[in-house]
Image (cartoon, coloured by chain):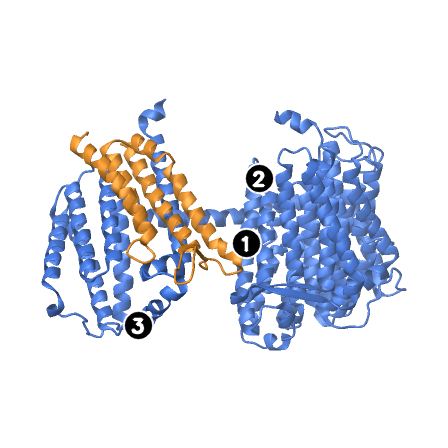
């Protein structure tokens, strides 16, 4: 049946497909409608969500979030349309759509939130949905490993970010971004500034895959191609960039910020560009060029001048346009020819003319060739570099130069070589892709061209407002395709020359890099595995130490810990002041009798050799305790204690019947050790109870419950009113635990039954 | 082991215990009792029946799977807590209705708290019986 299902292509992927296409498209139109308004004044609205924790659901729509919102919904529409054909026949396509839409909502929430805590929540939504999307082909071990790696790396960064958010919230006294931004100077001069900065950067660097946390991103390419295009190049990995841009007015403009961001960003950009040349899988080439873009963006945000921020915002848009188009194009090529190997693919231009046009537009933009918008972007990066002073200027320009030249080469590898020359031998015969898959890359490519020819359109409505949101008020930004003969233009020309030379010898270069890689001992990916192995070995070691499978050992460890913690606290805090709140005269003769009964029961337990006698002895002790409760007129507690005692005796005797008869380990030292632990627990508890009685009784709670039990909760049994009304949430937790424990025990018992030897043989 | 005395007494005791467990549940708000205690008493009734007869017979008499009952109980308790949301109040705020109330007569109090307690009863009852049935079955 599944076969028929996959063979009938549904129009646009069926209902799931329509929903997934219409949802981002409608939002895109909606955001476009707000564009002129937001370009003038940011919109800020909100409502309380969890007022007791200071969490507000507040929306800040300024130039920065508008830029991201348009990218998310616009590229989202292209990607969902593309997926409806790319994965529309997949049996799990509706599930894929759910993950993708969850991601989209998370990402939109992240960029639109004005509250740091809700930013964190949405941040984690994108992490989790990314995990599900990378692992979409869950039957492949590679997918599962890559998904887990991405989850753990970005998740760890996310938790660090949460810590940073909480510290920042405490320093600023609010979690609202709009409120924190106003206190930038206070925070920059605060003693906790460095801690806050490092925690935020840990979150941003892991999410945006900066060296040394970069290794998860190329592995994330195990995801279906539309996911790579959407999450791992155009949107999610830019969440870290978004965070740094958002925080720039608060944390930016200090030497630490400047150097950390420019150095890490620059190193990431150049390292990634070199690695891109090394790859033969063209999807991996693109993965590394994404890293390069993320590094460049980090570096530019770190540089922090108005030119640099404008260049960063411009490059953000430019990169999303061309990179999403290129990824989608590669998906078409892969679908059509069955391979993504740069050495095999060539001469596809004739068979796939539309794909070739889309690829050419995007790649020209990536290489920064006029009149594409990529050229404008590159000019601005050089201008930003030239605007800096001293060593910083040389660093930024050198890094930009190296990365741009290598991007030129990468553009050639992914979009020139596969489409020109002689037709290569591919697993399938190449043919043009369907319109749903071509629409996205073509439109995105056309946009790269349009914005290149009319850069002011982009500058006035998108990049300008975004730069204002990040940098602060500044005169209007004017983007030009032709800025006259200046230093930036000469640098561009030099870049083309260098890029061209490198492209001509890129295959030799690749061989050289491959040899270098083989001899290079530093491998982050393998290091990650070793880290995980180390964790697992540590867990196994300490589990074997504490939980060796012997129940006696468990009990000994638990009770010894109890003695050390409670008794130790007692001794060192000097909690016991000698006041004992009970004298023998206060004890009623009936209570003496019950006490004698309890002692007899306890002695019976310790001296008997029969398990059943021991269980019965425990029962005597328990019933004695419930009798004590009755003498203190606490019938509720007494009934509960009695019933629990009865049930424990029943359950323990049932369990006893199942336990194996092991040889007794009753050596003298063994018994003595246990006697010490048992005596210790008894002594600690006794002292605890006596000194509690000796301390002053605080009657506030009792008075409160006595006063409000009937008027507020219509109940006269205070114990039960507390259980089901005042503290109902606790009780709810308890019954959930009871149920879970019962089900878990049931499953365990079932498991034992399954692995009995005679059943194994059958 | 079949004991005639145990089997005969059990018939009587099980019925009594079950009625008493519901009684304990309902009186709990004003007098000693409540869902937890009621659930324990109810469970004892079926444990007694299990020991006197067998797991299969106890299971047949109960009709529903105790694990399902426990989970249903957690669900009922959760819904009772959520009902406060309909009145726009925080989770687990007790909702009270007094049926047939008139001057000087409080009427019959029906509350979300009562349903919460019934949920507790079912969770405790079902949870313990799940354990006991599983343990007894294996022997």
Query: Which of label 3 and label 2 is nearer to you?
Result: 3
Q: Say whether disc 2 or disc 1 marks the residue closer to the N-terminus.
A: 2
Point 42% across, 62% down: residue: B103
Q: Place residue A20 in its image quadrant.
A: top right
* Residue linked to disc 2: A142
Q: Is residue A418 left or right of residue A303?
A: right
Vertical comparison of A582 with A314: above or below: below
Chain identifier matching the blue colour in the rendered picture: A
- Mark 2 surroundings: few (<14), some (14-19) or many (≥20) residues within 10 A: some
Chain identifier matching the orange colour in the rendered picture: B
Alpha carbons under labels 3 and 1: distance apart? 46 Å
Check whether the beta carbons of the residues at disc 3 and disc 2 lie within 8 A of each other. Answer: no
Q: Nearer the viewer, residue A449 or B130?
A: B130
Query: Which of label 2 and label 1 is nearer to you?
Result: 1
Q: Is residue A355 left or right of residue A546?
A: right
* Residue linked to disc 1: A155
Q: Position of residue A723 (x, y in %)?
A: 36, 58
Q: Nearer the viewer, residue A69 or A213?
A: A69
Query: Which of label 3 and label 1 is nearer to you?
Result: 3
* Residue linked to disc 3: A699
Alpha carbons under labels 3 and 2: distance apart? 62 Å
Any part of residue A152 in sight: yes
- Describe the element under mark 2 as helix, strand or loop: helix
Point 63% across, 77% down: residue: A185
- What is the tally of numbered marks visible in this picture? 3
- Mark 1 surroundings: few (<14), some (14-19) or many (≥20) residues within 10 A: many
Alpha carbons under labels 2 and 1: distance apart? 19 Å
**Chain ID for label 1?**
A
Q: Place residue B48 in its image quadrant.
A: top left
């Amino acid at each position: 049946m599944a076969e028929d299902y996959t063979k009938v292509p549904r129009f646009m992927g069926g209902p799931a497909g329509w929903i997934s296409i219409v949802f981002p498209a409608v939002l895109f139109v909606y955001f476009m409608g707000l564009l002129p308004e937001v370009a003038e004044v940011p919109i800020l609205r909100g409502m309380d969500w969890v007022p007791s924790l200071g969490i507000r659901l507040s929306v800040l729509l300024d130039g920065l979030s508008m830029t991201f919102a348009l990218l998310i919904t616009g590229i989202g529409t292209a990607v969902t349309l593309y997926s409806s054909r790319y994965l529309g026949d997949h049996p799990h396509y509706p599930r894929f759509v759910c993950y993708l839409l969850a991601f989209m909502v998370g990402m939109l929430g992240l960029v639109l939130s004005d509250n740091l805590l809700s930013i964190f929540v949405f941040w984690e939504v994108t992490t989790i949905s990314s995990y599900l999307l990378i692992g979409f082909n869950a039957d492949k071990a590679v997918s599962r490993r890559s998904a887990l790696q991405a989850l753990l790396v970005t998740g760890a960064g996310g938790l660090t970010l949460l810590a940073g958010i909480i510290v920042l919230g405490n320093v600023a006294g609010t979690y609202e971004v709009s409120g924190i931004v106003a206190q930038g100077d206070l925070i920059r001069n605060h003693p906790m500034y460095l801690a806050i900065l490092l925690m935020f950067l840990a979150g941003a660097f892991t999410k945006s895959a900066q060296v040394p946390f970069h290794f998860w991103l190329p592995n994330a390419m195990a995801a279906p191609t539309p996911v790579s295009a959407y999450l791992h190049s155009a949107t999610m990995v830019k969440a870290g960039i978004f965070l740094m841009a958002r925080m720039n007015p608060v944390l930016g403009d200090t030497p630490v910020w400047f150097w950390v961001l420019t150095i890490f960003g620059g190193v990431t950009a150049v390292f990634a560009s070199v690695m891109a040349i090394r790859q033969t899988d063209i999807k991996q080439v693109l993965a590394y060029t994404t890293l390069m873009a993320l590094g460049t963006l980090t570096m530019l945000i770190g540089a922090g001048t108005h030119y640099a921020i404008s260049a960063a915002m411009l490059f953000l848009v430019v990169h999303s346009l061309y990179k999403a188009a290129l990824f989608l194009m590669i998906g078409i090529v892969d679908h059509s020819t069955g391979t993504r190997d740069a050495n095999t693919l060539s001469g596809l231009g004739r068979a796939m003319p539309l794909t070739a046009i889309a690829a050419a537009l995007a790649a020209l933009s990536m290489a920064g060739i006029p009149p594409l918008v990529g050229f404008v972007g590159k000019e601005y990066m050089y201008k930003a570099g030239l605007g800096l002073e001293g060593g910083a200027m040389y660093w930024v320009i050198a890094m930009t130069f190296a990365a741009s030249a290598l991007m030129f080469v990468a553009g050639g590898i992914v979009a020139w070589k596969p489409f020109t020359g002689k037709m290569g031998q591919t697993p399938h015969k190449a043919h043009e892709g369907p319109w749903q898959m071509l629409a996205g890359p073509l439109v995105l490519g056309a946009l790269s061209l349009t914005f290149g020819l009319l850069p002011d359109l982009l500058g006035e409505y998108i990049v300008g407002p975004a730069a204002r949101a990040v940098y602060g008020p500044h005169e209007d930004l004017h983007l030009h395709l032709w800025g006259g003969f200046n230093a930036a233009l000469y640098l561009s020309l030099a870049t083309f020359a260098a890029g061209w030379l490198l492209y001509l010898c890129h295959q030799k270069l690749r061989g050289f890099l491959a040899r270098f890689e083989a001899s290079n001992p530093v491998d982050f990916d393998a290091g990650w595995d070793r880290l995980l192995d180390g964790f697992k070995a540590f867990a196994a070691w300490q589990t074997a130490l504490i939980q060796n499978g012997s129940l006696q050992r468990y009990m000994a460890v638990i009770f010894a810990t109890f003695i050390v913690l409670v008794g130790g606290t007692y001794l060192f805090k000097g909690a016991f002041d000698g006041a004992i709140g009970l004298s023998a005269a206060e004890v009623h003769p009936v209570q003496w009798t019950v006490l004698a009964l309890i002692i007899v029961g306890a002695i019976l337990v310790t001296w008997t050799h029969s398990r059943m006698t021991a269980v019965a002895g425990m029962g005597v002790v328990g019933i004695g305790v419930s009798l004590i409760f009755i003498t203190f007129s606490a019938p509720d507690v007494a009934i509960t204690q009695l019933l629990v005692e009865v049930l424990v005796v029943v359950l323990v005797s049932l369990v006893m019947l199942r336990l194996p008869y092991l040889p007794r380990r009753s050596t003298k030292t063994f018994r003595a050790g246990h006697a010490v632990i048992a005596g210790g627990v008894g002594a600690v508890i006794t002292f605890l109870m006596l000194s509690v009685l000796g301390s002053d009784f605080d009657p506030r709670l009792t008075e409160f419950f006595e006063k409000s039990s009937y008027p507020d909760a219509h109940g006269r049994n205070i114990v039960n009113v507390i259980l089901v009304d005042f503290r109902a949430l606790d009780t709810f937790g308890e019954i959930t635990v009871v149920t879970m424990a019962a089900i878990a025990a049931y499953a365990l018992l079932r498991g034992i039954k399954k692995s009995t030897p005679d059943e194994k043989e059958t | 082991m079949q004991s005639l005395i145990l089997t005969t007494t059990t018939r009587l005791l099980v019925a009594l215990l079950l009625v008493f467990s519901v009684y304990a549940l309902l009186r709990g708000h004003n007098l000693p009792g409540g869902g937890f205690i009621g659930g324990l008493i109810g469970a004892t009734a079926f444990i007694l029946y299990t020991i006197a007869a067998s797991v299969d017979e106890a299971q047949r008499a109960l009709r529903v799977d105790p694990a399902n009952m426990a989970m249903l109980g957690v669900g009922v308790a959760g819904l009772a807590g959520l009902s406060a949301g309909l009145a726009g109040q925080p989770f687990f705020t007790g909702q009270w209705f007094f049926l047939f109330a008139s001057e000087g007569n409080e009427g019959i109090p029906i509350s979300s708290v009562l349903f919460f307690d019934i949920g507790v009863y079912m969770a405790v009852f079902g949870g313990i019986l799940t354990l006991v049935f599983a343990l007894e079955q294996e022997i």
